[in-house]
Amino acid sequence: MSEVKTYPVSTNASQRAWIDESKYFEMYEKSIKNPDAFWGEQGKQLDWIKPYTKVKNASFEPDNVSIKWFEDGTLNASYNCLDRHLAERGDQTAIIWEGDDPGEDKKITYRELHEMVCRLAGGLKSLGAKKGDRITIYMPMIPEAAAAMLACARIGAIHSVVFGGFSPDSLANRIQDCDSNILITADEGLRGGRKVPLKKNADAAMANCPSIKHCVVVKRTGGDIGWQSGRDVWHHELCAQASPDTPAAEMSAEDPLFILYTSGSTGKPKGVLHTTGGYLLFSAMTHKYVFDYHDGDIYWCTADVGWVTGHSYIVYGPLANGAVTLMFEGVPNYPDASRFWQVCDKHKVNIFYTAPTAIRALMREGEEPVKSTDRSSLRLLGSVGEPINPEAWKWYHEVVGDERCPIVDTWWQTETGGILITPLPGATPLKPGSATRPFFGVQPQIVDADGKPLEGACEGNLCMTTSWPGQMRTVFGDHERFVQTYFSTYPGRYFTGDGCRRDEDGYYWITGRVDDVINVSGHRMGTAEVESSLVAHPKVSEAAVVGYPHDIKGQGIYAYVTLLVGEEPTEELRKELVQWVRKDIGPIASPDLIQWAPGLPKTRSGKIMRRILRKIAENDASNLGDTSTLADPSVVADLVENRMNQG
Ligand code: WTA
């Protein structure tokens, strides 16, 4: 391994920081030795209606997986994100919204956001919504999306945000899985100058979702849309009639706050369930310390609210902290490749948090689009969603941050609710490509294939030995699947699905997924989902999907497809299959490469040997390992010979 450069903590960063290096070690030790005392104290950052007397109550034992934090306390998440700030910062900006069109932006104060949320909460109640109902949100990146989440939280309804890039079928599956009765959407979204037909997609989904009684529609573009009277209601009309002061419901700390669907190695996406108290505390606290957020800072996370990063680090964490959070409707390269940095200059952004895939895409455009902007407001940069390769890290540091801004490479998952492994800007010397050290209360363990814990410098599979407050509590409606997926591989521990290396300084280096999940442009995709979409095509007999290294996306989607006997493998059919998956799941699932496979490598018991398919896709065919157990070893030679050129 080549020499790794370490970047010491800058004096600027440590002087202003909440936490310096010695404080990190002191707090970390306390968090591990006495979690009840540590979290009991930290929990006071939130406003409780009834204070908790119990703190941690968690078991990872497979026959009794149960996770509870602050279980006898009561609170309301929307109250914590809004009402409690009104006296001191009612007129401070809560959300800076930057439209897709650079000419469009607005600022919303805490008082205004509070009113927006109260009105929608009241409106939802008037439609019959009540505590525990599931409300699906399918929206563009507009402030109404954040307000919709908080309005659900206010009345104790459980929101399920579905990314606006998902297809009608994907939306329908998610609505059906949690049996939602209300859908909140917009007429159309706007991204990169193009319209996204959200209501049209929603209509197609609702045709198969009898559970939906009402659809609340935000007017974003004013485009023509279908309308079903009795079911559909305009957001602005609903809110106009509702009270500007709908009270926040008293919720137990362990009452569900939201469901968020995420892909796994098998089956359909699962509904990750997060609850109120622990999640809110963990997102707020990580936001404060990891981004070293202080009053007056302008903070921008470029994620979409359809993903967990948007939940924790656009909405809940920042708003619980009374921060200024920027919400961007558009894309990094529209109208041109300077857009991110123009927005930073326009709104004087201090803290900027994005994904490696965006950095790599912008890197390809060269330095000019960055250097033509000022960026002197930037103080801290963040990265999330996939491993950041050291070249991209260095470009981010040198070109974007002018070597002035520390980079926090934050490792976490939908399941973890918030950041688990990360530098703290005032406390952690950085190594490009390493997520560095565990956050407070987080106890990583690296294990070998048999689950034996490895010590010191090592490489293996990443587990957590103990619970943290932001941890998911269950899979909605399927606790057994929760136990099976996360606690059965290595009993007594939470298994992340990621591979990881620990170096001699105790730094963690995430190496990527070790299961059948791939990470495409920072988006999680189950290979099984893409496969089942492909085999649903009338000309396809079988399909196997794996990831392969992709310069911009991190991983691309490589599909091996076997056609039904008599079907011609044409270029046209290849395109048709790409479109098929795109339409079925959404653009993020489109295969990058499709290879026609006369046969797939299978064991004699019929199991597809993905290891071999991965090696071929990675262009590492000299390293196929043992193929003697294959039912028909000759299929491998054909696949190697006809491997798709990745250009
Ligand atoms: C990957 C996104 C390396 C990892 C918050 C994880 C990362 C999956 C990093 C979760 C990082 C996320 N370095 N890998 N800093 N952050 N990952 O659920 O494989 O969309 O398991 O949550 O992304 O993706 P998810």
Image: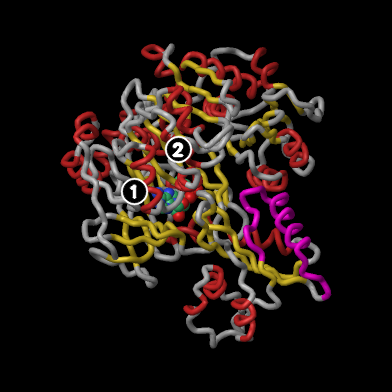
Q: Position of residue 60 (x, y in %)?
A: 39, 56
Residue situated furthest bottom in the rendering: 628
Badge 1 crowding class, 10 Å Cα cut-off, few under 14, some 14 to 19, many 20 or more, is many
Quickly name the residue at label 2.
Answer: 368
Residue type pointed to by label 1: Ile
Magenta stretch: includes residue 409: no
Residue at position x 48%, y 33% from top?
340
Residue situated furthest right in the rendering: 566
What is the magenta range? 566-594
Colouring mode (rainbow / by chain / secondary structure / one colour): secondary structure
Magenta stretch: includes residue 591: yes
Quadrant (top left/top right/bottom left/bottom right) for the N terminus = bottom left
Which of labels 2 and 1 is toward the front?
2
Q: Nearer the viewer, residue 629 or 365?
A: 365
SS at mark 1 in the image:
loop
Q: Is residue 399 left or right of residue 614?
A: left
Residue at position x 52%, y 58% from top?
550
Q: CA distance from mark 2 to mark 1?
A: 33 Å
Q: Is residue 124 visible?
A: yes
Residue at position x 51%, y 52% from top?
552
Q: Nearer the viewer, residue 596 or 149?
A: 596
Q: Position of residue 327 (x, y in %)?
A: 51, 29
In this rendering, is residue 243 above or below 356?
A: above
Quadrant (top left/top right/bottom left/bottom right) for the C terminus = bottom right
Q: Position of residue 64 (x, y in %)?
A: 43, 57
Badge 2 crowding class, 10 Å Cα cut-off, few under 14, some 14 to 19, many 20 or more, is few
Residue type pointed to by label 2: Glu
SS at mark 2 in the image:
helix
Quickly name the residue at label 1.
Answer: 421
Q: Nearer the viewer, residue 558 or 288?
A: 558
In this rendering, is residue 618 above or below 28?
A: below
Task: State whether label 1 is within 8 Å of ligand 1.
Answer: yes
